[in-house]
Image: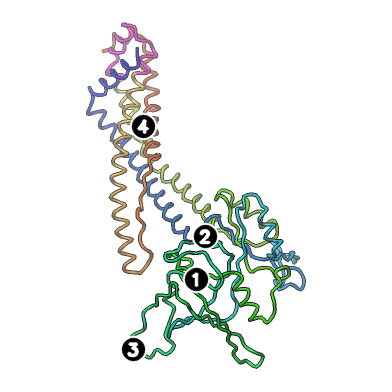
Amino acid sequence: MGIFDLISLILDNLNRRKGRVGLTAVGVIIGTAAVVILVSLAIGLQANATAQLAGIGDLTLINVIPTYGGEGDPGGPIISIDGAPGNIETKLLTPDALEELRTLPGVQDVFPREYFYGEARLKYQRLETWAGGTGVPPGALKTMGLIAQQGDVELEKGTIVIGSNFNTTFFDPNFRPGKEPPPPPDVYNQQLRLEIIKYDPDGNQIIKNYQVRVKGILQSNGRDDWAIYMLLDDVTTYNEWVNGQRINRNKTGYNEAVVKVDDPKNVKPVYDAILALGYQAFSPQPYVEGINSFFTILQVIFGGVGAIALLVAAIGIANTMAMAILERTREIGLMKALGATNRDILSVFLGEAAGIGFLGGLGGITVGWLVGEMLDVLVVAYLAGQAVQQGGPPPPESAVITPLWLAGFALFFATIIGFLSGLYPALRAATLVPINALKYE
């Protein structure tokens, strides 16, 4: 029997029993729809959780800070993991240490980051604000993935790059109650006066003025919206004036270093290598991996719940095929008498069972997608209402996501369930003795 003859015979047999096939396929539709809806919901939750965690920072960046330990070090008493006293080697982020980090496999770039630890004010016209600052080398902001909504992120001497909301921190020191507060100033490409403040031994305030220009304003990312970035050499100059002495990086090192990894897959090995060198490190990647693992397990659980309905449907398919054999026993005997082999009979009944699973799978995917779309609209609308009432973050674009691979897997799984459900009835049909089958009433 040729493949086309087989397919034609299977379709004809299914078409002759539309009502029974349809009722049997309903169970498959329900099971497949349950799998699609539940797994799509889990995928949507994972996508939204990962998108929110992306606000922590670039997943290929690792923040490294010095380790202080040992007797007499400012790190204080050292306690080992098992609770016993111990000593930890001091590891400073000196220029040599940065080169050591740069040689690690998978590291694309390493640059220091220094914080201004004095007191400072930024003044523009009659407005002012208290200001800190972070110093980075040229090109570091681009490496960090920061994008400018105005200007650019290429720092130069005497320039700063600020966050999208930083201008809202300006205030009028002479503001009086009853007056309307001044609007946030547009400081892009404007010259600001930076006042660096320190105190003499008698507590008298000493101020040194610098002129800085706002070279760029960053796009909002939730992390750097109130930040000020300066050139590393400028921050070093300010800190040296506040301290009253020059800074020797070979002795004191930097406050922090940022390690750029070439691929998110290499973050974990690089992170472990940094810890093995004795430094302290932080990266959001392990948190993202943990959340992805959790949602993967959630997808399996949700899919398993839906698969239970499919297993129930499998019993219905097996029952339908068993009844079909009883009703068509003489037909089977006639087919064998005309030359059909056991393999031909087996193929026909397995094809019919798989066909019921395939049709049910198609219907289940359609129903699951439609229900998922309706559920998505309701969930997003609810979250939008909550965000308006409580002032929370904006709702996700989509709460239920049905990828193509899920639809393909659900259709394949439903077809396989149908195929396996028809295996025992098909074997019974294939092994019927022709003479006995022809005598069957």
Q: Which one is in front in this view, the residue at disc 4 or the one at disc 3? A: 3
Q: Are marks 1 and 4 in contact (CB under 8 Å)?
A: no
Q: Position of residue 375 (x, y in %)?
A: 30, 51
Q: Which residues are magenta?
A: 325-347
Q: Quadrant of residue 225?
A: bottom left
Residue in view at x 69 percent, y 74 percent: 247
Is 248 part of what is drawn in magenta? no
Q: Is tag 4's residue or tag 3's residue first in the polypeptide sequence? A: 3
Q: Which mark is residue 314?
A: 4
**Residue receiving disc 2:** 142
Magenta region, mostly helix, strand or loop? helix
Q: Which one is in front in this view, the residue at disc 2 or the one at disc 3? A: 2
Q: Which one is in front in this view, the residue at disc 4 or the one at disc 2? A: 2
Q: Residue furthest right?
A: 71
The three-letter code of the residue at mark 1 reads Ala
Q: Position of residue 431 (x, y in %)?
A: 39, 14
Q: Which one is in front in this view, the residue at disc 1 or the one at disc 4? A: 1
Q: Quadrant of residue 407?
A: top left
Would residue 230 appear left or right of 406 to someone viewing this image? right
Q: CA distance from mark 3 to mark 1?
A: 29 Å
**Residue receiving disc 3:** 179
Q: Residues within 10 Å of mark 2 (few under 14, many from 20)?
A: some
Q: Residues within 10 Å of mark 1 (few under 14, many from 20)?
A: some
Counting every numbered tag in the picture gives: 4
**Residue receiving disc 1:** 227
Q: Are marks 2 and 3 in contact (CB under 8 Å)?
A: no
Q: Is residue 55 above or below residue 357?
A: below
The three-letter code of the residue at mark 4 reads Ala
The image quadrant where one finds the C terminus is top left
Q: Is tag 4's residue or tag 2's residue first in the polypeptide sequence? A: 2
